[in-house]
Image (tube, grey):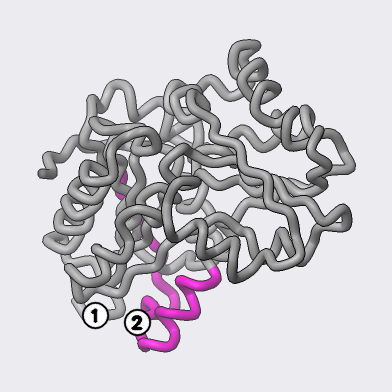
């Protein structure tokens, strides 16, 4: 196998990164993709930083052993807490998602941007730097949203309980004058219709997955690592948790039947 035809590894704390995987598949149809859900440890968002770093290292090490040509960190919490460590630990190219503060700051008309994310993402030094660099002159209102990841992990995308949580977290952002809401967790795009409905038509909801897929393509092209033309990419789905729990939810989010394999990592 040539270097360019090796697979791309994508990992998240659970199933949320499938939102990023969908965009990667759309932008890069010839690439072989491996999706790794660390479901045994989901959610990362409220775990101590040392645990998040250790699990992220374990995820990348597993994908490296599989021979991937690059890794996509499809988890805002892992990016905020662990990506610097990952880049110094591994020689693999690493593309990481982060909250789309920059485009939100450019888009807002009210001058107020809301960020919906996990506790650890919002507490990370990386997020603070992101706001300081890209949101000058804009008020950024943050809202931690514990419980939303678990709703997506359970496939409960539109239940009354899920809507109640979304209302609890989105209402303060709208009340603060935010006309743009950044989805700062890869699980949240699966709740985007609900978030949009609660926020109202005057609020723009931004999902950074599209930008990640474009950046991945740019990086692969620059390194001459794009897969051969004419190939049809394959998809593999792995979980560190019970397959019987992960498989139906991943299939629901992916929009097609999938086969999920259990793997051990760390």
Alpha carbons under labels 1 and 2: distance apart = 7 Å
Residue at 34% over, 38% down: 44
Q: Which quarter of the figure is the N terminus placed in?
A: bottom left
Residue corresponding to mark 2: 225
Residue at 39% over, 37% down: 45
Which residues are the magenta region?
A: 214-237
Q: Position of residue 7 (x, y in %)?
A: 28, 65
Q: Position of residue 204 (x, y in %)?
A: 79, 48
Residue at 40% over, 55% down: 80
* Residues at circles 1 and 2 in contact by the CB criterion of under 8 Å: yes
Q: Is residue 258 visible?
A: no
Q: Position of residue 157 (x, y in %)?
A: 58, 24
Tell me, yes or no, whether the highlighted magenta stretch contains residue 97.
Answer: no
Q: Quick one: SS at disc 1?
A: helix
Residue 120 drawn above or below residue 82: above
Residue corresponding to mark 1: 3
Quadrant of res 167: top right
């Amino acid at each position: 196998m040539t270097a360019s035809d090796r697979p791309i590894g994508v990992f998240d704390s659970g199933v949320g990164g499938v939102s990023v995987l969908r965009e990667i598949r759309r932008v890069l149809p010839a690439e072989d993709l491996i999706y790794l859900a660390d479901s045994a440890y989901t959610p990362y968002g409220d775990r101590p930083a040392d645990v998040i770093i250790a699990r992220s290292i374990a995820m990348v090490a597993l994908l490296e052993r599989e021979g991937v040509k690059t890794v996509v960190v499809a988890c805002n919490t892992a990016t905020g807490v662990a990506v610097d460590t990952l880049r110094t630990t591994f020689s693999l190219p690493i593309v990481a998602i982060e909250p789309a503060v920059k485009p939100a700051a450019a888009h807002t008309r009210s001058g107020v941007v809301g960020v919906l994310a996990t506790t650890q993402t919002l507490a990370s030094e990386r997020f603070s730097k992101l706001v300081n660099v890209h949101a000058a002159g804009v008020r950024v209102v943050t809202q931690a949203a514990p419980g939303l990841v678990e709703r997506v992990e359970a496939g409960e995308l539109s239940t009354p309980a899920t809507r109640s949580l979304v209302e609890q977290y989105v209402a303060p952002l709208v009340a603060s004058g935010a006309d743009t809401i950044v989805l700062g967790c890869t699980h949240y795009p699966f709740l985007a219709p609900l978030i949009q409905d609660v926020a109202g038509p005057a609020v723009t909801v931004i999902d950074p997955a599209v930008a990640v897929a474009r950046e991945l393509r740019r990086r692969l092209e620059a390194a001459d690592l794009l897969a051969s033309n004419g190939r049809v990419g394959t998809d593999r789905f792995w979980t560190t948790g019970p397959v019987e729990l992960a498989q139906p939810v991943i299939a629901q989010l992916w929009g097609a039947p999938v086969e999920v394999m259990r793997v051990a990592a760390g």
